[in-house]
Every structure is written in structure tokens, then in C-alpha cells.
Amino acid sequence: MKILTLFSLFVTYSSGNSINIEENAGQFFSSGHTNNWAVLVCTSRFWFNYRHVANTLSVYRSVKRLGIPDSHIVLMLADDMACNHRNPKPATVFSHKNMELNVYGDDVEVDYRGYEVTVENFLRVLTGRLPPSTPRSKRLLSDDRSNILIYLTGHGGNGFLKFQDSEEISNVELADAFEQMWQKRRYNELLFIIDTCQGASMYERFYSPNLMALASSQVGEDSLSHQPDLAIGVHLMDRYTFYLLEFLEDIHPASKSNMNDLFKVCPKSQCVSTPGHRTDLFLRDPGSVLITDFFGSVRKIEITMETINLTDPIQQVELSPVNEELQIEKYSYADQLPVSEIIHQKPKQRDWHPPDGFILGLWTLILLVFFKTYGMKHLKHIF
């Protein structure tokens, strides 16, 4: 009897494992994409729009952490806040209070900067209509197996987004650009995210298939800023992007979080505005779409039946240009950084800065001590 019970338990456990494996495999192959791309755009100039640059760089940092390489990211920044003469910390852009997290980093590759960030260049990047002389780093070299993340931030209104306060792109132009991308087989699935005032108006005219859109605010609503910093003198981020990135910090390459979780990242109690999303054009159920389908990366693999020994050093033969003798250089694989150390990387606070209201409270305390000691009659000696 005991043997029969153990056998039944083993069969149940094995069948449960096989079901889980089949579900994971089905979820893995459900997307059908073989590569990921990201187009991240900040459309605002001037120092008081510091937060828009920080928004874009923060998303850039997150997608790189999750595996999308710089070669598959097109980064467009309308202004260089890191080198602005008002920046108290040159070569840095911060997204958290007290300068805790420098999102500019040491390896940012900006593809379009300053006056290169125009409506024309943005549309040319999407549709692939670039001059032959354009380098690969400035091209979106996607195909019909590409999942593309497009993130926009800046100042907008009902049906338009401003570029550098000199021109604007309409929701119709954007919708037509996405349709060109679909007709030219430039994407498999596309995720569009916009953080701007009345952002939902930008996806109202979309009509191309396999497209999902998110916005920070509804028509008639403003998208509000977040985290003012007294040392820098401006707001550091927008509310929607702040809570979006707070959610992404808990995502790792093996996460099972789906798009339904992403829709809930910033409720109205936190954003003040009402975030919106549109999924009617998307062919898959958002609950089956992993966050890493757009914010992570997949790579092409080659299956071989041959045995490859990775333990022995790899030998590469090179011809010396001096004496034309054969030289053998040995290479070996370095130990990779464990995934546990990559996930949840928390920045270290380098410099201490007084919290908000500290200086004002200190002066108030000094004045109270002075009045208690000398009284009001000595006030004239101060002013």
C-alpha cells in the first residue's frame, strides 16, 4: 500500500512538472520575436525641462540592465543637461532626491542630440527613410521579428507633442508612421509609451495591428512632475515615469510579470492624472505578454549537434606583421557576474545633502534663540 501511494505521488509530481514546462515553453514561444529594439526620445530643451531628460535616461538605464544592448537602442536627447552650465554636478543627471542615482552613467551612447532631435529625423528613424550616409548607430535596423519599445516624453497637448518648442508631431502623423512600419515589415509587436500632458490623445488615431499603447494622462489632464530638488533647482522626474521605473527595478530577465501589471504601476492616487492604455489593436492577450518581451532582450541562437569544449583555452592564430611568424595567443572565458548581483542594483549615496526645509528650520531655530535671549529691542542690530 505504501509503495502504491509513493508511486501515485511520483506520477502526480511528474505530470505537474511536465505541465509547468509546457506552459513555460508555450509562453516563451508565444511572442514569436527574435530581437528587441528601443527608441527613447526626449523632445524638450532648456534647463527647466531637466526632468524630461532624466525620464528618458532612466528608461535607457532600465532597458540596458534588462539586456537590450546599445546597438539596439536609438537614444534621442534634445538637450545636454549633463553639460549645462547650471548643473551643480557636471557630467551627471539625477533621477532621485539628494542626488542618489546618476542615470547619465559612464557608458551612455546618445545617437541624436540637440538640434538633431526633430520631427523629421524621428519619423525617418521609424520608417527607415534615412540617407545612405547615416551610420548604423542612428538607424532602427528592425525586421518583422522585432519587438520595439518606443518611449516619448516632453510637452504636449490634445493630439500633438512638441519638439524643442519649435515644431510638433501630430497623432495622425505618428499613426501613419506606425502603419508604414507595419507595411514595410519593420516590427512584430510594438509598445508605445508617452509621458506628456493629454498623452492619451496621441494614440487615439492608431490603426496598425500588433500595437499596444500607454499614456500618463487622459485628454484634458496634465501630466505632473515629481521630486523637486533644492540643490539642482528643478523637478527631477515626472510622476508616471517615476513609478514606472520603480516597478521596473523589481523586474529581472526571468520575471513573469505581464502587461496587466504594467497598467497598474501608477494609479490616480499617485499620478494625480489618470493613466490610460489601449490594447484593442494588439493580437495577444496582455496578460500573456511578459514585461521582458519589450523591456528585455532575446538573442538569436544556433543549434548544433557537435560537441564544443568550453573548458580548454581558445587558441587564435595570428600572423605577425613584423617577422611573419605564426604566434599563438590563448584566450579563456572570464567568470560572468552572477544574476543575483545584477538584479536589484541599488545605487550608493555619494554626497550628503540636507533634506528639504533643513536650512529654513535652522534659521528659525537661530531666530527663536535670539529673541528669547535678547528680545525684540535688539532686532535692529540684525537688519
Image: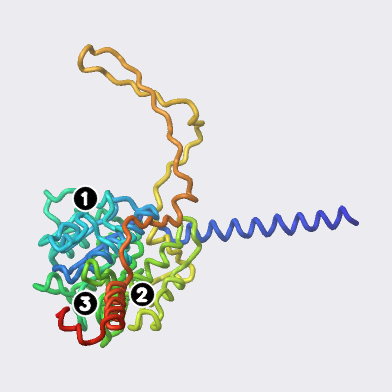
Q: Earlier in the sequence, mark 3 or mark 1?
A: 1
Residue located beneath label 3 in the image: 171
From this view, report whether residue 202 is shown above or below residue 289.
below
- Pointer 2 local density, CA inside 10 Å: few below 14, some 14–19, many at least 20: some
User: Which quarter of the picture shows residue 177?
Assistant: bottom left
Residue located beneath label 2 in the image: 281
Q: Can the viewer see residue 347 in this picture?
A: yes
Residue at screen point 45% across, 64% down: 290
Q: Report the Cα–Cα distance between label 3 and label 1.
A: 27 Å
Q: Can the viewer see residue 238 in this picture?
A: no
User: Which quarter of the picture shows residue 251?
Assistant: bottom left
Foreground tag (3 vs 1): 1
Residue located beneath label 1 in the image: 137
Foreground tag (3 vs 2): 3
Residue closest to the eye, 209 or 118: 118
- Left or right of 246, for residue 129: left
Q: Earlier in the sequence, mark 3 or mark 2?
A: 3
Q: Amino acid at mark 1?
A: Ser
Disc 2 element: loop
Foreground tag (1 vs 2): 1
- Left or right of 22, for residue 4: right
From this view, report whether residue 301 is shown above or below residue 234.
above
Q: Amino acid at mark 2?
A: Leu
Q: Earlier in the sequence, mark 1 or mark 2?
A: 1
Residue closest to the eye, 19 or 333: 333
Give x and y (percent) for residue 128. 19, 58
From this view, report whether residue 231 is shown above or below residue 361.
above
Quadrant holding the C terminus = bottom left
